[in-house]
Image (spheres, rainbow, N blue to C red):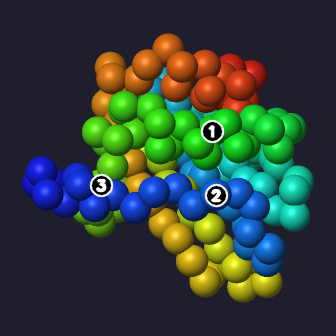
Amino acid sequence: MGFLSKLFRPPMPPLPSEGSAFVITYGTISPLAAFCATIHMTAGVADAVWSTIAGGTTKRTNHPITQEFFRTLWSAMDSLPEFRDGWTTAPEKDPVRGFHYFRAMIVDKDNPKEILFERRHVIPTKNASELLRDLLYQAGMGHLK
């Protein structure tokens, strides 16, 4: 992505918005497993659902989060340097090891296929700050087995 397109990264809209669901999807691949999450807040209720895929088996885990935590994670997508540097408009591709994949969306809660806002980030795992790793841990990644 060129320098000029980096200047036009849309800001994360403020929370909440009536009639909308706020969704952050996340994925990464380690040497032993793939990890995926859907972290969302709808009507003030926040939750995180994690999937671990290893050896042909998928395990799903719900991890409760607070509205305050969701707001912190949503805001971090504007404030952390790795999100600014990792913003992309490139089409989604199959994930590869060594990267964190994030997608932030606002969808119509009555019609979830209607995307009102979308932003994607691809961040090299080596560039993840301590704060980003801590946010992922709090979102539930640290509780996966």
Query: Is residue 108 positioned above or below 93 on the image?
Result: below
Q: Which residue is mark 2?
A: 14
Image spot of residue 81 (x, y percent): 37, 31
x 12%, y 51%: residue: 3
Q: Tag 2: residue type?
A: Pro
In this view, 102 is above or below 14: above
In which quadrant will I find the N terminus?
Answer: bottom left
Residue at 70 percent across and 32 percent down: it is 139
User: Which numbered disc, 2 or 1, marks the residue that appears first in the sequence?
Assistant: 2
Amino acid type, callout 1: Leu
Residue 58 appears anywhere in the view: no
Indicate which label's residue lies in the foreground, 2 or 1: 2
Per the image, label 1 sits on a secondary structure element best described as helix
Secondary structure of the residue carrying tag 3 is strand
Instruction: Classify mark 2: residues with Cα within 10 Å, few (<14), some (14-19) or many (20+).
Output: few
Q: Residues within 10 Å of mark 3 (few under 14, many from 20)?
A: some
Q: What is the C-alpha distance between the residues marked 2 and 3?
A: 20 Å
Secondary element type, mark 2: loop
Q: Quadrant of residue 71?
A: top right
Which residue matches tag 1? 73
Q: Residues within 10 Å of mark 1 (few under 14, many from 20)?
A: some
Q: Nearer the viewer, mark 2 or mark 3?
A: 2
The residue tagged 3 is 88
